[in-house]
């Protein structure tokens, strides 16, 4: 899943259309359709990757910003586990696609895969509690490496 604005970037559009579900953040009806499309994709056996921040923050990288609720709503409604993954290096390797001369560059991307959050664990939590838990889990490796404030 990714922001629908990517459909406006000529090269990215080609790949994005075939492999992703666009999320229309400024249109509630289209956003709901994206949610249904994601739920159907999961039923068909597809994995869904969601960056719950809902975008790349403009400053204080790699500080994480408050998560949007869609990913947690989807996991609870579709009854699917969550595999939290912390990306340690993406904040300095990727820039917004509309920044043609942005700071993006190739490099090694280190990740930290956390324990799965089961459907049973999720059922014990509200969506906001689940969001807070995932935020805490994802932030820990960044804090341990001094990449994020406590």
Image (cartoon, rainbow, N blue to C red):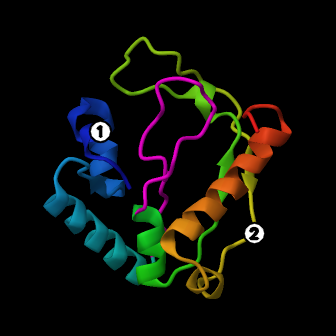
Instruction: Estimate the x, y position of residue 123 in percent, counting from the top left.
Output: 57, 86
- Residue annotated with mark 2: 115
Span shown in magenta: 46-69
Query: Viewed as shown, does residue 25 lie left or right of 65?
Result: left
Instruction: Estimate the x, y position of residue 16 in percent, counting from the top left.
Output: 33, 47
How many residues crowd mark 1 within 10 Å: few (<14), some (14–19), many (20+)?
A: some
Q: Residue at x 49, y 59 (%)?
A: 49
- Residue annotated with mark 1: 6
Instruction: Estimate the x, y position of residue 26 in percent, counting from the top left.
Output: 20, 47
Classify 131 as above or below 5: below
Classify 31 as above or below 26: below
Classify 136 as above or below 133: above
Q: What SS does tag 2 mark? A: loop
Q: Residue at x 18, y 58 (%)?
A: 28
When asked about the image quadrant of residue 121, the answer is bottom right
Q: Residue at x 71, y 39 (%)?
A: 88
């Amino acid at each position: 899943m990714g922001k629908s604005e990517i459909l406006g970037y000529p090269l990215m559009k080609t790949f994005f259309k075939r492999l992703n579900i666009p999320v229309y953040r400024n249109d509630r009806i289209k956003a709901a359709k994206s949610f249904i499309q994601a739920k159907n994709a999961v039923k068909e056996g597809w994995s869904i990757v969601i960056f719950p921040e809902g975008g790349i923050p403009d400053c204080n990288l790699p500080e994480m910003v408050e998560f949007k609720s869609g990913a947690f709503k989807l996991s609870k409604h579709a009854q699917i586990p969550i595999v939290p993954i912390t990306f340690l290096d993406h904040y300095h390797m990727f820039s917004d696609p509309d920044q043609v001369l942005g700071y993006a560059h190739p490099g090694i991307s280190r990740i930290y895969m956390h324990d799965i959050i089961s459907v049973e664990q999720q059922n014990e939590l509200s969506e906001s509690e689940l969001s807070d838990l995932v935020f805490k889990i994802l932030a820990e490796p960044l804090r341990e490496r001094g990449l994020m404030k406590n």
